[in-house]
Amino acid sequence: MKMTVIGCGYLGATHAACMAELGHDVLGMDSDIDKVHTLNTGKAPFFERDLDGLLAKHTTSGRLRFTASYREATDFADLHFIGVGTPPQPGNDAYDLTHLFDALTKLAPSLTTPAVIAVKSTVPVGTAPRVAKILREHAPAGDLIEVAWNPEFLRESFAVDDTLRPDRLVLGLSTDHSWAEALLRQAFAKIIESGTPTIVTDWATAELAKGAANSYLATKISFINAMTEICEKTGANGTALADILGHDHRIGRHGMQPGLGFGGGCLPKDLAGFISRADDLDADQAVGILREAAAVNARRRQRVIDLTHEELGTDLRGKRITVWGAAFKPETDDIRDSPALAVAQALHNLGATVTITDPKALDNARKLHPELDYVEDPIAAVDDSDLLLHLTEWPHFTTIDPRRLATRTANPKVIDARGILNTDQWRDAGWITRTLGRA
Ligand code: UDX
């Protein structure tokens, strides 16, 4: 099949490469000409495991290319996936739909024949009818343009795998939808045939699916982190508690790792956007639990700052703090709403000298926070430090020998905010250890 993907960020570039991998001819379209150029050389403008391999394979095979022209996109295919970003509005938690509406308004004038527009971007519930109206008003083919909602649940660092082997496929369709469903089933045929649960539903349910899923995931993380607040006061062990709860098949261990809490470009934004939309709908009571999940998450960041004061005193001026981790989670260079960077920035504002190390995210962090210090080697980063903070759980950090590390500083103190360092080993090596979620 031929298809386009409009908007080639994390979501769109991955979707385009994976559709080519499934055997389709794909044209990715993005208005950022530099991004188009990079993608056409077979590289992603960000780090995502396995994605460069797929981009290189299919830009070479000829099944995938990228353009900055809307006209070229509409000439290329009848099925257009939309993956443009929907960030929060400036100074507001509601989704900013400018990029989405702008892309549709630019795409529509060259939609002269029937087409299916399948939107993957995350939006507030109630957006689909607005999309259909824009297309009806601006596309020469008018009512012959069908709108479908196809939410994307991919995790960064597993984006390729999650796209090719999703947990479920959701097709949100209007009542008169026969062609859209047929085209999408054809596009995802290999995924459907492999047994992926496929839920065909209405627009509103499909729109809600992504926000509700991310709200649940965020709440689950905050639940275990709230429990660890009690662990910290009682001597209980938050990680062991998570293990015990996780063995209950109704609960499950996944998403129950206690620690510094969630960040990234999706969970915090979707939680806030979902709450904001519920407020608009006069359904604020329905999202009280989500407000609390956000509050618990913010308290985890503050807890690390409080522990830092406990270790280094109230006045942090002149203190040297090493931070292991800048990315919002391991195996990504994404620093959007990174808990690690938020803590680092707060400590810098309190007068500390903060040195950060991260295997992939240093360039992005340096651009956003030039006021912080950066070192590539996690061992050298500890030189003359008063305190080490383990804030992003890159596997590499856990392989570093604490004995070797202890020789680099006169103050071997560590706060493990992710709860995965081997505390016994670190103590034997002479470190004073504190672990978030434990007394
Ligand atoms: C998330 C959703 O998982 C995905 O389905 C959606 O499409 C986009 O948002 P992602 O942002 O890539 O994906 O990250 P995820 O792996 O879910 O982690 C989110 C945050 O929660 C990270 O900061 C992570 O460190 C944190 N987290 C995750 C925990 O603190 N504890 C956990 O047990 C799991």
Image (cartoon, rainbow, N blue to C red):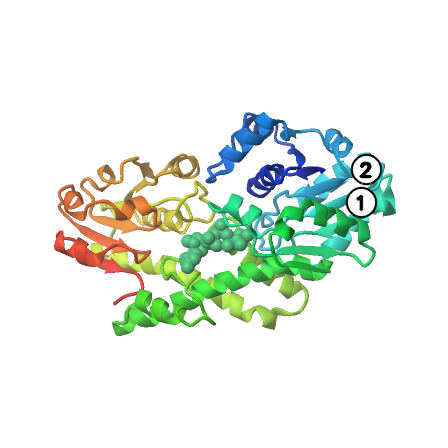
> Within 10 angstroms of label 2, few (less than 14), some, or many (20 or more) residues?
many
Q: Which residue is mark 2?
A: 111
Q: Please tell me whether residue 204 is drawn above or below residue 361 in the rendered image.
A: below
Residue type at mark 1 is Leu
Residue at 54 percent of width and 59 percent of height:
214
Q: Are marks 2 and 1 in contact (CB under 8 Å)?
A: yes
Q: Residue at x 54, y 62 (%)?
A: 215
Classify residue 187 as left or right of residue 327: right
Q: Is residue 412 left or right of residue 42?
A: left
Query: Going 76% across and 34% down the picture, which residue do you hit?
Result: 74
Question: Which quarter of the rendered picture does the C terminus lie within?
Answer: bottom left
Few, some or many residues within 10 Å of mark 1 (<14, 14–19, 20+): many
**Disc 1 secondary structure class:** helix
Residue 220: x, y in percent?
Answer: 46, 65
Amino acid at dot 2: Leu
Is disc 2 placed on a helix, strand or loop?
loop
In the displayed structure, would residue 165 be above or below residue 49?
below
- Foreground residue, 5 or 168? 168
Q: Position of residue 266 (x, y in %)?
A: 53, 51
Decide which of 70, 197 is in the foreground and name it.
Answer: 197
Q: Is residue 420 visible?
A: yes
Q: Which residue is mark 1?
A: 135
The alpha-carbon separation of the residues under discs 2 and 1 comes to 9 Å
Q: Position of residue 2 (x, y in %)?
A: 72, 36
Pick the quarter of the image with the N terminus: top right
Q: Where residue 335 appears, x then y in whole percent?
A: 44, 44
Q: Which mark is residue 299?
A: none
Nearest-to-viewer mark from 2 and 1: 2
